[in-house]
Amino acid sequence: MPNRREFFEVDVPIHDTANPALKGLHVFTGVADSPATALRRAHEVYDAALAARTAGLEVPGRQPDGWGASGVRPGWEMEWTAAKAGRWHNPLSCTPRSDFAL
């Protein structure tokens, strides 16, 4: 039985190469059939975005499978070996709209 395609999230720790104490998290989302595929797609779209930015070109937009990379930051290094991939869960899915003030 083939794997069902679902929406995944890949969280990749990042740090500023000029000041390693500055840390963050780059989040990628898109459709995949497994965490391994999600991680591979996140890495592919990031590499394409970085190559485009380095060449002075526009960063590619979101792909048909939902994967894309925006917010590529010069001087920030992705820690791919520490990346985590799993099914995406909407943090707002159990929060009623009335709880939000506009």
Image (cartoon, rainbow, N blue to C red):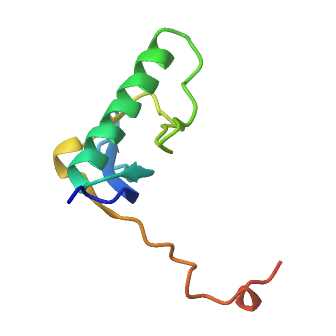
Residue 23 sits above or below residue 92 on the image: above
Q: Which is more toward the observer, 77 or 100?
A: 100
Residue 35 falls in which quadrant of the image? Answer: bottom left
Residue 30 sits above or below residue 63 on the image: below
Residue 51 sits above or below residue 25 on the image: above
Q: Residue furthest left?
A: 81
Residue 7 sits above or below residue 66 on the image: below
Q: Is residue 53 visible from the viewing direction of this image?
A: yes
Q: Residue furthest front?
A: 1
Residue lying at 44% horizontally and 72% vertically, measured from the top left? 89
Q: Residue furthest top?
A: 55
Residue lying at 34% horizontally and 53% vertically, measured from the top left? 10
Residue 47 falls in which quadrant of the image? Answer: top left
Residue lying at 23% horizontally and 55% vertically, measured from the top left? 2
The percent position of residue 6, horizontal first and vertical second, equals 39, 60
Residue 81 falls in which quadrant of the image? Answer: top left
